[in-house]
Image (spheres, rainbow, N blue to C red):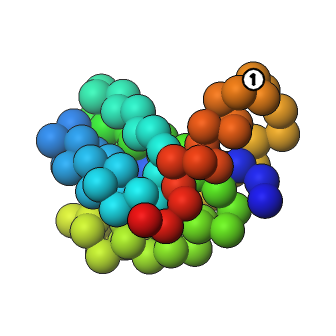
Amino acid sequence: MAEVMIYVTTATPAEALRIGRLLIEERLAACANVLPQITSVFRWEESIQEESEAVLIAKTTDQRADEVVERIKAAHSYSCPCVVVLPIVGGNPAFLDWIRSETQPG
């Protein structure tokens, strides 16, 4: 089992917080960080967009990652949300152990 971070952009900080709380309540993630203000520049439907968004970073395990991605997609307001899984390649062993223990199915 390895640890991963899941990076998500949302329309608002409130949406990021709502999804983060949901993941914690369901033990799908050990921790969720909300970065309330970013500016995203992207091409969507053939035009360049510039939007204010928020970021959610959830820490979980690779074993739960697919379930977390599906839960985020179901709870998200976007039709095609940015939800990407990034491996954690190292860090504080005690913190990584905590991620594993907090994401065990209840």
Residue 37 in view: yes
Q: How crowded is the residue under tag 1: few (<14 C-alpha within 10 Å), some, or many (20+)? A: few
Tell me the residue at 65%/29% (across/down): 95
Residues 95 and 76: in front is 95
Residues 79 and 27: in front is 27
Q: Is residue 39 above or below residue 43?
A: above
- Seen as rendered, the residue at the extreme left is 14
Number of marks in the rendered image: 1
In this rendering, position of residue 49 left or right of residue 67 = left
Which x, y percent locates residue 106? 43, 65
Which of the image's four quarters has the N terminus?
A: bottom right
Tell me the residue at 26%/68% (across/down): 75
Which x, y percent locates residue 9? 39, 48
Residue picked out by circle 1:
92
Q: Is residue 97 above or below residue 75?
A: above
Which x, y percent locates residue 5? 61, 46
- Seen as rendered, the residue at the extreme right is 89
Which x, y percent locates residue 81? 39, 64
Tell me the residue at 15%/41% (across/down): 14
